[in-house]
Amino acid sequence: MPQQIPAEELGQLVQIIATTPDGRSVGELLALPGLQIKKRTLQRRLDQLTGEGRIRAKGEGRGRRYLAAENPAPPSPAKVTCKTADEDDRFRGSVLREEPGDHAWLSDEARNIRAVVDQPRAKRTPVGYQGAFLDAYLPNRTFYLPETLRKQLAEMGQVGLTDLPAGTYVRQVLDRLLIDLSWNSSRLEGNTYSLLETQILLEKGEGAEGKATEETQMILNHKAAIEMLADQADGIGFNRYTICNLHALLSDNLLSDPAACGRLRSRPVGISGTVFHPLEVPTQIEERFEQIMAKAEAVKDPFEQSFFVMVHLPYLQPFEDVNKRVSRLAANIPLIRHNLCPLSFIDVEQKDYVTGVIGVYELNRVEYLRDVFVWAYRRSCVRYAAVRQSLGEPDPFRLRHRSAIAKLVREVVLGRMEKAKAVDWILEETEKEIPEASRAKFVEVVELELRSLHEGNIARYRLRPSDFGAWQAGWK
């Protein structure tokens, strides 16, 4: 009986081949430092993957190359694309290996960081904020994510809506994203709500029994902040308004001083579990915050932009608390603006995330956090690809009139209109705002949306369960 090839070894080949649009030859694959197998063994595996349709072959003889399949199966959730030795100098030799076992996706640099961070605090050298770390970053010249990786992330994140207005995609998956991102981001802070409890809280407004008030507030705050990003997709950016308002929403009712919500801190803070000491002088915090905003906004690549703020916002600690939460939601800003798949931190372990952040704090090393970011984004893409398939293709008419539709639906509910009154009011408003040729279709869509409202989808109209319940009683 022929020996069965381990699935992880086949997965490694698929992922390596997928890193380059032009594919790879047998000779190029054999030259990779992270792939130590014999030529005949490699050819057998390539033949098997070709036969299974997981890759495709092009050319004959020595000119034969292997490319990613045109319609590949969804990637394994525990895999991250391999880095190859042709990356820039900072990433040479950092092949993300597809080894069996836990955390096979970590690079050698990340493993080294983990070895340092896992030491007892007494053995780690206390450090303060290093301004040179931020100064050394030059937008569009310095990259934390190498080019090959940025290209792969871009391919994974595409949803076919590039030419549509900012925020189009996130609004399509908003119901699911509100639950996923609120739960996962809160979970990374130690929140003990389950996924189902989070869903019930966000859809029905019912808090879980036995949970601390702070935990319930944390999840509700995430919902409000995510809705702000979706509602204001065409206006958000890396500026004081967006980031400070994100903080204000995420920290609402959680800080001892309410005035600290949305305001840069003016006092020292400490961080548990690390020997890192953040900046203390308010004027320096202000200066560095503005520097981060300017550099982030200048970065052109959305994934580099996303990861940059995940690194530097927690490192600066510009607010009294809730800094990591702000960075995780801010990381979605460029993805929302470019209609890319959002990042919801699905399946990210708290220890991995914390280790990556401490690696930045104490060593100014980004590799562990980078590996977490890439792995998390792959999981998110798999997740929302399935969501998108269930939704089908977007209706162009609805996309074109999405703001007007949402406005009317929201006002009907908040106004607690009965059916007869709503019909007349919708017609009146439609005549004011919609061209005559589109009015009949527009009224039909608004009425359909009202008939389809339920507790599980009211978030897209920024409605609370209490608003919906009061309106529904009269509507029926």
Image (tube, grey):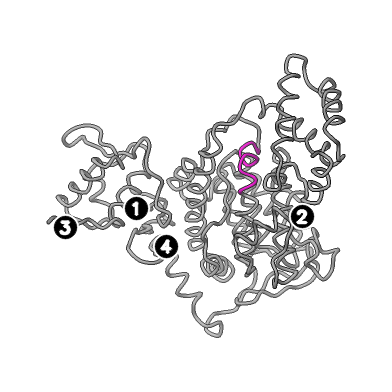
Cα distance, mark 4 to mark 2?
Answer: 33 Å
| 4 or 3: tag closer to the N-terminus | 3
- Specify the segment rendered in magenta: 167-176
Q: Which residue is mark 2?
A: 244
Dividing the image into 4 quarters, which one contains the N terminus?
bottom left
In the image, residue 418 sits, relative to residue 266, either above or below, namely above
The location of residue 100, given as percent across then percent down, is: 32, 63
In the image, residue 164 sits, relative to residue 228, either above or below, namely above
Q: Amino acid at mark 3?
A: Gln
110 or 258, which is in the foreground?
258
**Element under disc 4:** loop
Q: Nearer the viewer, mark 3 or mark 2?
A: 3
Cα distance, mark 3 to mark 2?
Answer: 58 Å
308 or 89, which is in the foreground?
308
The location of residue 31, given as percent across then percent down, is: 25, 51
Q: Amino acid at mark 4?
A: Leu
Cα distance, mark 4 to mark 3?
Answer: 28 Å
10 or 137, which is in the foreground?
10
